[in-house]
Structures are given as C-alpha cells and as structure tokens.
Image (cartoon, grey):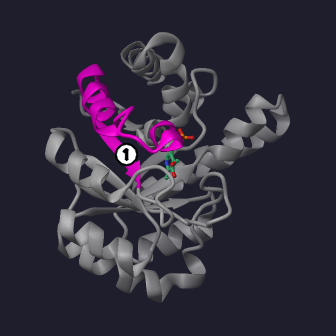
Amino acid sequence: MAQNALRLGVNIDHVATVRNARGGAYPDPVRAAVLAQEAGADGITAHLREDRRHIVDADIEGLMNALTVPLNFEMAATEEMQKIALRHKPHAVCIVPEKREERTTEGGLEVAREENKLAHYIAPLRDAGCRVSIFIAADQRQIEAANRIGAEVIELHTGAYCDFHAEGRFEERDREFEALREMATFAHSLGLEVHAGHGLTFDCVQPIAGLPEVKELNIGHFLIGEAIFSGLTPAIQEMRRLMDAARP
Ligand code: PXP
C-alpha cells in the first residue's frame, strides 16, 4: 500500500447486534470480519461494551485467532477491559467513553479532566505493545491532553458532522467539518497519528477521507446496513473506492 494511503477499519459490532437479537450463533461477526479482510479492509474494529450488547468475549478471542489484519479493540477505560486487552494484546486499543443508557458512543472521551488517571491506565497497554488511540471530539484541549498522557493515536469523532449532513443542516455540518480539519492538522503537528470515525456513509465520507493528516477511518454501522442490500464485499469495495478517490 502507498505510504499516504488511507486505511479502512471495518467495525463488525452490528453483525453481533443482529446475532444477539435472537441469541443464537449467526450471523457470526468473526466470519464477517474475515470476509471484510478479504474485501480489502486494512483492519477490523470491535467494541466490547461493558453490557456485552453486541460483541462478546468469545468474539474477541475468535477475531484474535482468525484475523491476519490488525484488530483495533475499542473499550472503556475500566479495569475489566484493561485485563482483557492485556490478555489478548491486540494491535491497537481505542479508549472510548461509554454510558450504559446510550444507543451508541455519543461523545468523545473527556481526557483533560482525567489526565493522571488515564496516563496510568494506558501505560501498561503501551508497555504490552498495543497502540493506544483515544476517541475524542475536535477539541484542542482534549487533543493536547491526549498527547500529554502518551497516546500515539487520536480518533476524531465524526458523529456530529455526519448527523448534520444527514439532517440537511449544512451550515452546522460545515462548521463541524472545519473544526475536524483544523484539529486533524493540529494533532498531526504534535506528532499524533490521526484517525476518524463514527456515522460515516457513502454520502459524507469523502470530505473526511480527503483530509491529508487522517490515516485511518473506522466505519461500521452503515457498511453492515448496506450489506443487506448489496452484500458486505461490494459495500466495502465501494467505500474503499470513495475513500481513494477523495485522497489528495
Ligand atoms: N470509531 C469509534 C471509536 C466508535 O466507537 C465507532 C462506533 O462503535 C466507530 C468508529 C464506528 O462508527 P459507525 O458504526 O457509526 O460507523
């Protein structure tokens, strides 16, 4: 892959959502992950939530055994998740805020207020060889704090930008995009690797994919939904095509 190519991480959580709706064994998120890998995903992302509403512990084990591309393990900063991550040692861990009552990850992590705690929390993960990423809003204070605690990567939360786009609120979307653009440049200037994700679709991915500092997009819900109509492989290939076409 070219040096400046944009990586696509496919999040397979919502294959597990469909499986868990019936409590059985299918559709299997590990099978979806292997298919995504064959379709051109550069990595697989999975979020083991505290309530196990989609991905469960056995899925993480299965992904670690089945994948040849890197696993990006999304987790809340809890003791339980740290133990699980240290047991599996995935390529990357992405620390996300988590509230039981939310439908999806609503905002970015509050790093600035929890700086000391988070610095201690991520140190053993880094020592174990995991790349530590912090999921944050496009907010300079949070990015500076993520840098100070020793994170190597930040993932910018694109959820608000995507929602404004979908709702036709284009002025707000453009303001949010400007903030993402500026903060991608700022984070890159500190030496952080910049990723982005949440809510991205065929319709709104290209401006984000065109930001030269962004090295990876993590996309899940839309791709799994689109797979109902076109199949997972064509959905991933179309996303890949749009991302590559947007690259400067
Ligand atoms: N990145 C992070 C940190 C996330 O928490 C999620 C959702 O689990 C995603 C990316 C993918 O978001 P979506 O499923 O909306 O594409």
Going by the numbered disc 1, the residue's amino acid type is: Thr
Magenta residues, start to end: 18-47
Asked if residue 246 shows in the view, the reply is: yes
Whether residue 37 is in magenta: the answer is yes
Q: Position of residue 58 (x, y in %)?
A: 28, 54
Q: Does the residue labelled 1 lie within 8 Å of ligand 1?
A: yes
Q: Is residue 150 visible?
A: no
Q: Mark 1 points at which residue?
A: 45
Left or right of residue 48: residue 1: left
* Residue 173, quarter of picture: top right
**In this image, 170 relative to 30: left or right?**
right
Q: Quadrant of the C terminus?
A: top left
Q: Residue at 23% x, 71% y: name it.
A: 86
Q: In which quarter of the image is the N terminus?
A: top left
Q: Which residue is drawn at 77% across and 37% down?
A: 164
In the rendered image, residue 152, in percent from the top left (x then y), is placed at 34, 63
Where 138 falls versus 111 (above or below)?
above
Of residue 18 and residue 39, the one placed in the foreground of this image is 18
Q: Which residue is depicted at the point 50% across and 83% down? A: 115
Location of residue 172 by image quarter: top right
Q: Position of residue 84 (x, y in %)?
A: 28, 69
Category of crowding for the residue at label 1, using alpha-carbon neighbours closer than 10 angstroms: few (below 14), some (14–19), many (at least 20) = many
Instruction: Count every numbered label the image shows and give the total.
Output: 1
| Residue beneath the point at 84% across and 36% down | 171
97, above or below 169, in the image:
below
| Image location (x, y in percent) of residue 124 | 25, 79
* Left or right for 186, reference 149: right
Q: Residue 13 lies in magenta, yes or no?
A: no
Secondary structure under the numbered disc 1 in the rendered image: strand
| Of 180 and 116, the residue lying toward us | 116
Answer with the quarter of the image where residue 36 lies. top left
